[in-house]
Image: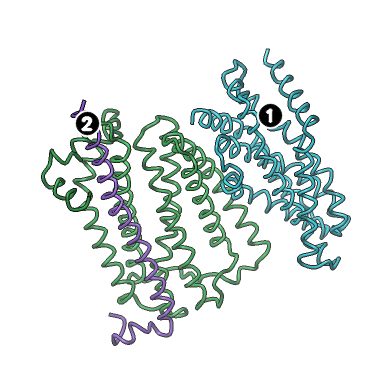
Chain colours: A cyan, B green, C purple
Amino acid sequence: MYWYSIKSMISRELLIAVRYPAEVLNPLVFFLMVVTLFPLGISPEPQFLAQIAGPVIWIAALLAMMLSLDSLFKNDFDDGSLEQLLISPSPIVMLVLVKVITHWFTTVFPIILLAPLLAMMMQLPDEGYRALILTLLLGTPVISMIGGIGAALTVGLHRGGVLLSLIVLPLFIPILVFSASAIEAANMIMQYDGQLAMLAAMLVLALVTTPFATAFALKISINN
Amino acid sequence: MWTWYHKLSSPKWFYQLSGQWLPWIACAAVLFLGTGLVMALAYAPADYQQGNSFRIMYIHVPSAILAQSCYMMMAVAGGIVLIWRIKLAEMVLKCIAPFGASITFLALVTGGIWGYPTWGTWWVWDARGTSMLILLFLYFGVIALQSAINNTSGAARACALLSLVGLVNIPIIKYSVEWWNTLHQPATFKLTEKPSMPMEMWLPLLIMVVAFYLVFTVVLIMRVRNEILEREYKTNWVRKLIDPSADRSIKSSVKNGGE
Amino acid sequence: MYFDSFEAFLAMGKHGVYVWSAYGLAIVLLSVNVIAPLLNKRKVVAKQQARLRREQQKRASN
């Protein structure tokens, strides 16, 4: 029975992404611009860029994601469909998870697709590409899911945007640390399975815990 | 056991009991803090390598310990808020955060002041300092969320959830920061940790730790009592308590300060 | 007593500035934390009393 609501939720999310491409494109452009600032601001020297390429792309992706996370529940909250969702008989936790994953797919996946291009511009060594993509694929869903808790907590607030970044950015530090070090290891042609395993572990942990927290946070926010 | 628990969670009961205890705890705090300060500053011998700058440890270490356990207590209060919806826990949660943030700040700054004469730099990206900084960010997040939500109990519940999420993340953050630190920095900047501190060195530390906890208790009780007066206005006992016509001593204080 | 004289106590063997600024900051921060709720209590009580008085006046006029 709730397969239907899950399916309708996915198609609805995809439809919104198609109807309002700005929601998808704006973070993407932001991502591109932020990365461009680094060579301009620090140094365009290829060797230096190669060194910072991985972390810079990661941080830029993180900030771009923060922009799009703000809108994760906002529109649904404004038009009242979030309330409908919470009182619907379908399991809320499941629907929240589906929503976060769909949102990740529509807004973050394009960022990952764009990442190799930026990596090329940032002179990332050839060895680093695989690590960059793998860490992004493993790490960004965790960020979406933890960020989802923050987005749910701040959904009804007027000054939600900055507040959201403030409360969730510290929680992203482990992901950034392991991702950046995996890319660095890859650049030096070293093993980085350990870092990937850590990221995968965090992904699993986030997958089983965050939907509950997000659903709970939504209930709190609705009652405010 | 459970009746005791419910009694403890009633604001009225807490207000009365804490009112009786507060002077004693405050006296103990002053006593411990005074003794600790004198011992730390005047009686503890100087470190054979760091000289007298090591006396900053007696501020730095207690504040660092308290900063971490404050977050723990805040998260525990958060758990109680979410599970049992106890009003008193909501107030405790709200009142811990600012103190926790200021004591974390103290730990960071004294760390810097200690680091400069010892290592020649105000700030190093070592594992402990960085974890402390992130802890400060976590406190800022809770305080910001608290102040952004107007609904009192909604704010408490949101902060409760956030502090619990933070608590789950703290070990992961700590582990990742330590791991990051071993990658990027050979551990040259390490405190000279001696296996056994002489008694006259660790006794002041112990006293200072107790003193900091006592000060924390005093501040927390005072803040929670204010919060009770603020939020329990509708109850009869608070009205009676603040009613100027019921009590002459308060009445005179109102005439002096109120208008 | 570890120090020979009061001057030595103040100087802290060249580290006086650091030690005293750290302790000073600690005292200031702790006192602010203690004084703030004390001041706040006065404010809260005055506010609630004013509220109570308003309500009593309202009831009396009715």
Does the CB distance between marks 2 and 1 fall below 8 Å?
no
Check the residue under mark 2 and report the chain it is in.
B
The answer to which quarter of the image holds residue A18 is top right
Q: In the image, A193: left or right of C37?
A: right
- Residue B157 higher or lower than C35, as above or below: above
Q: Residue furthest left?
A: B248
Q: Which secondary structure, mark 2?
A: helix
Identify the residue at image location x=31%, y=34%.
B9
The answer to whether A125 is drawn above or below residue B48 in the figure is above
Mark 1 Cα-neighbour bin, 10 Å: few <14, some 14–19, many ≥20: many
According to the image, label 2 marks what residue?
A: B236
Please state if A202 lies on the left or on the right of B210 as rendered: right
The residue sitting at 56% across, 33% down in the picture is A213
Identify which residue, B220 or B193, lies in the foreground. Answer: B220
Residues A207 and B19: in front is: B19
Q: Quadrant of the N terminus of chain B?
A: top left
Q: Amino acid at mark 1?
A: Lys
How far from the left and from the top, in percent, is residue A73?
A: 64, 32
Same chain letter for marks 2 and 1: no
Q: Nearer the viewer, residue B154 or A187?
A: B154
Question: Please, what is the three-letter code of the amino acid marked with disc 2?
Answer: Asn
The x and y percentages for residue C42 are 26, 50
Report which residue position mark 1 lands on. Answer: A99
Chain letter of mark 1 equals A
Q: Spatial distance from mark 2 to mark 1, Cα to Cα?
A: 47 Å
Q: Residue furthest top?
A: A1
Residue at the front extreme, as displayed: C61
